Amino acid sequence: MNSFFLTTPIYYVNARPHLGHAYSTIVADSLVRFHKMLGDDTFFLTGTDEHGDKIVQAAERQGCPPQKFVDEISARFQSLWPQLGIAHDRFIRTTEPGHKRVVQAFLQRVHDAGDIYFGEFGGHYCYGCERFYTEKELENGLCPQHKTRPEFINEKNYFFRMSKYLPWLKSYVEEHEDFIRPRRYRAEALAMLESGALEDLCISRPKTRLQWGIELPFDDNYVCYVWFDALINYISALGWPDDRNFARYWPGEHLVAKDILKPHAVFWPAMLKSAGLPVYRHLNVHGYWLVRDTKMSKSLGNIIEPVEMSRRFGLNAFRYFLLREMRFGEDASFSEDALINRINADLANDLGNLFSRVLSMTAKYFESRVPEPSAFLQTDDAIAELCLHSLQNFVQLFGGTQFDAALESLWETVRALNKYVDSQAPWALYKQGSTARLATVMYVLLTAMRKTALCLWPVMPDASRQMLEQLGSPAAETVPPVPALRKEGNSFDGLSPGTVVASSSTLFPRIEMKRDAAPKTRRGQ
Ligand code: ME8
């Protein structure tokens, strides 16, 4: 059995979770569910990043002690995920004693390897990024991410000999095509490694300036730099070094947005190499969700609340939209109009309508039983082939994080099935009394619908389950779904004649959008 360990970033607890956090976590959830269906032994990790200046400042603004502050915001993240259908195996917090012990053991190991030294350093520190910038990296003296002026700080600190590992890392990235993907981020990482701008990494903060962190095991006047602490969560959650989960699941894969490419593509592999541990399998990097072409930010007041969206438009529809609309790796724009258009076109018109018409015809012509097919005609073979082909494409593309293309491939079948209904006109066959031909047509439709519904489980778990139940799978069989997605692409079967199916289906109601009014759904999905 293959193991599949996937992580999201651990989010800072200085702000409420928004669409961006929800996207990464929903994508990760879908990918883990997909691997479950392939029969893999999966482990899904998310959590919160709770140390550092930024958190202390946010707590101070609220007049709250840091521990109380992080407890409150971390709890918000924890209660959010189930509302978005996220089924993680572990939620890690960097203030947990177990994590702290692992960070100290890791630091000691890197220290023992001779890769940590003490030195003096002056640099431009951006509190938003929690990192020093070199002169070269600033844009007109400002932080390129936050467009704010960093503070010049000069102090004695501990440094990680990262530069020692950069030549190795560069060859590793060159030799492993999909270590960092999609390609544009691999190219970006290589450009960083080739630029000569990367130096050793400052990994401590003097306690005179910051107490909110993990103490260095070899000097109690210092705490650990928040990024060094945070990255280690990926193995502390597996109980490194002794827990069997580490042996079972490491190396895993990470999923992040492009804002944190550098710590994941450069710091983390160098840290792992220094500690003598294998590097991760893949770093999967996505772009930003924009709102009217700008990044979401509190000051612009354009934050999208994921729970509100899923309440108004339906959780399954919202998850589908996020995966279908964004080309993984590129930026995408969020708007309610785009969401409503997708729901109406893909879910209500294409998929929902297919289910509704085919099930009501099966009720009318065959008393809601899957009929026994007779010999397939060329047109039936063509549909069956298309269905299997799109399922195989789906598996290939989804596994390679091309979620939009994977779903589009399924929708080719959905649209073809609707056309097949129109061209075969079951109502005419019924009128003519061509029962054998009618039985084949309905069998083809129902079989293809079942395969489509199965593929949708990672993205829309509840809707997929509902569709499978409508197609006669007993609830016990659909939860969790049969972990044999690959086999489903081999032969056009899976639905036994005689199975009782539902007599009607209203899966995705159309959303009427009145200008300047809240959209109305007939029933939430
Ligand atoms: O960086 N579009 O935490 P963070 C898409 N604690 N994704 C977005 C987004 C947007 N507009 N905004 C945020 C940190 N994200 C560190 C991580 S990991 C060891 C430490 C998502 O709270 C995306 O996944 O700033 C991005 O990488 C992450 O939130 C940043 O979260």
Image (spheres, helix red, strand yellow):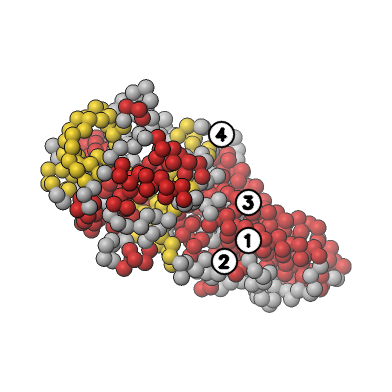
Task: Report the front residue among 147 and 105.
Answer: 105
Asked whether, in this view, residue 388 is left or right of residue 211, the answer is right
Q: Earlier in the sequence, mark 4 or mark 1?
A: 1
Do the numbered discs 4 and 2 sit on residues whose CB atoms are within 8 Å? no
User: Is residue 392 visible to the viewer in this orientation of the structure?
Assistant: yes
- Name the quadrant of the C terminus: bottom right
Q: CA distance from mark 1 to mark 3?
A: 11 Å
Q: Earlier in the sequence, mark 4 or mark 2?
A: 2
Task: Report the front residue among 10 and 308.
Answer: 10
Name which residue type carries label 3: Glu
Say which residue label 2 marks: 485
Do the numbered discs 3 and 2 sit on residues whose CB atoms are within 8 Å? no
Residue appearing at x 46%, y 47% in the figure: 174
Q: CA distance from mark 4 to mark 1?
A: 40 Å
Q: Earlier in the sequence, mark 1 or mark 3?
A: 1
Do the numbered discs 3 and 4 sit on residues whose CB atoms are within 8 Å? no
Do the numbered discs 4 and 1 sit on residues whose CB atoms are within 8 Å? no
Percent of width and height locating residue 183: 51, 45
Say which residue label 4 marks: 516
Callout in the foreground (4, 2): 2
Do the numbered discs 1 and 2 sit on residues whose CB atoms are within 8 Å? yes
Q: Secondary structure at mark 4?
A: loop
Say which residue label 3 marks: 408
Say which residue label 1 marks: 391
Q: Earlier in the sequence, mark 3 or mark 2?
A: 3
Asked whether, in this view, residue 255 is left or right of residue 62, the answer is right
Q: CA distance from mark 3 to mark 4?
A: 31 Å
Percent of width and height locating residue 338: 58, 40
**Label 4 beta carbon within 8 A of ligand 1:** no
Q: Earlier in the sequence, mark 3 or mark 4?
A: 3
User: Is residue 78 visible to the viewer in this orientation of the structure?
Assistant: no
Percent of width and height locating residue 322: 52, 47
